[in-house]
Image (cartoon, helix red, strand yellow):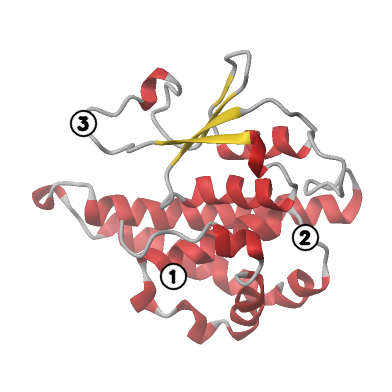
């Protein structure tokens, strides 16, 4: 395990940052990260100096190398610890983990697109077609994940569980009035237990942001 501090461009409201932070807690690497508060949406943000993509998270290694995206950061961190890997190396476990990672991140992508449309785009430029399309993508994916609820419950923790947990937490954070749990009782039960993990409790987003 590395003992040298790495700098993490951090925003507590970002579900992508939360995914990295949960993994860091679960792997015992959290104390290796120096969190750099970053306001991505401010006009005077300096995130572009570290990440030309202009987004968080970004991990700056001690030699100055920048890892500019959450999955890459998670892969890198998973190589630094000696416990069970959260990216399984082969077989069905790896396929499940990567599939759930893609689905969880897809829900996050769609939900964040809606947030940007509703809260960041000037009101006179807002439309309904794109947010409604993204909402349907979320609904379809939750329906699929409902079928996987038993497997999520019975399998060992992987990056796929973390990605889905971060995504569902973001739905609670930004779209609590849409009550996603009502139509997905199995997934809801899994998430209720998953959200109690110390890593999830420690990384919960602020009440307002």
- The residue lying at 86 percent from left, 47 percent from top is 83
> Do callouts 3 and 1 mark residues in contact (Cβ within 8 Å)?
no
* Up/down of 134 relative to 83, above or below: below
Q: Which residue is mark 2?
A: 157
Q: SS at mark 2?
A: loop
How far across and how far down the image is residue 193, in percent?
A: 66, 76
Viewport quadrant of the C terminus: bottom left
Q: Circle 3 is placed at which residue position?
A: 43
First along the sequence among labels 2 and 3? 3
Q: In this view, which residue lies farthest toward the top?
A: 63
Crowd class of label 2 (few under 14; some 14 to 19; many from 20; radius 10 Å) = some
Q: CA distance from mark 3 to mark 1?
A: 28 Å
Secondary structure beneath dot 3 equals: loop
Q: Earlier in the sequence, mark 3 or mark 1?
A: 3
Work out which quarter of the rendered image holds the N terminus and state it: top right
Q: CA distance from mark 2 to mark 3?
A: 39 Å
Residue 82 is left or right of residue 208, and the answer is right
- The residue that mark 1 highlights is 172
In this rendered view, identify the residue nearer to me: 181 or 20: 20
Looking at the picture, tell me which residue is in the foreground, 68 or 144: 68
- Asked whether, in this view, residue 85 is left or right of residue 35, the answer is right
- CB atoms of marks 2 and 1 within 8 Å: no
Q: Crowding at label 3, few (<14), some or many (≥20) Cα neighbours within 10 Å?
A: few
| Secondary element at tag 1 | helix
Q: Position of residue 109 (x, y in %)?
A: 46, 50
């Amino acid at each position: 395990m590395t003992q040298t501090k790495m700098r993490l461009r951090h925003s507590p409201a970002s579900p992508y940052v939360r995914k990295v932070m949960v993994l860091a807690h679960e792997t015992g690497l959290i104390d290796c990260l120096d969190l750099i508060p970053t306001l991505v949406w401010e006009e005077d943000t300096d995130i572009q100096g570290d990440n030309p993509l202009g987004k968080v998270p970004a991990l700056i290694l001690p030699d100055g190398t920048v890892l500019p995206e959450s999955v890459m950061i998670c892969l890198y961190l998973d190589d630094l610890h000696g416990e069970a890997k959260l990216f399984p190396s082969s077989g069905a476990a790896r396929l499940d983990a990567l599939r759930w990672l893609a689905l969880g991140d897809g829900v996050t992508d769609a939900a964040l697109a809606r947030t940007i449309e509703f809260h960041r785009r000037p009101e006179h430029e807002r439309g309904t077609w794109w947010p409604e399309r993204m909402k349907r993508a979320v609904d379809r994916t939750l329906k699929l994940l409902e079928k996987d609820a038993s497997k999520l419950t019975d399998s060992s923790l992987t990056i796929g569980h973390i990605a889905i947990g971060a995504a569902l937490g973001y739905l609670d954070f930004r779209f609590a009035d849409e009550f996603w749990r009502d139509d997905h009782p199995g997934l809801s039960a899994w998430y209720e237990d998953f959200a109690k993990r110390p890593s999830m409790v420690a990384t919960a987003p602020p009440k307002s942001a």
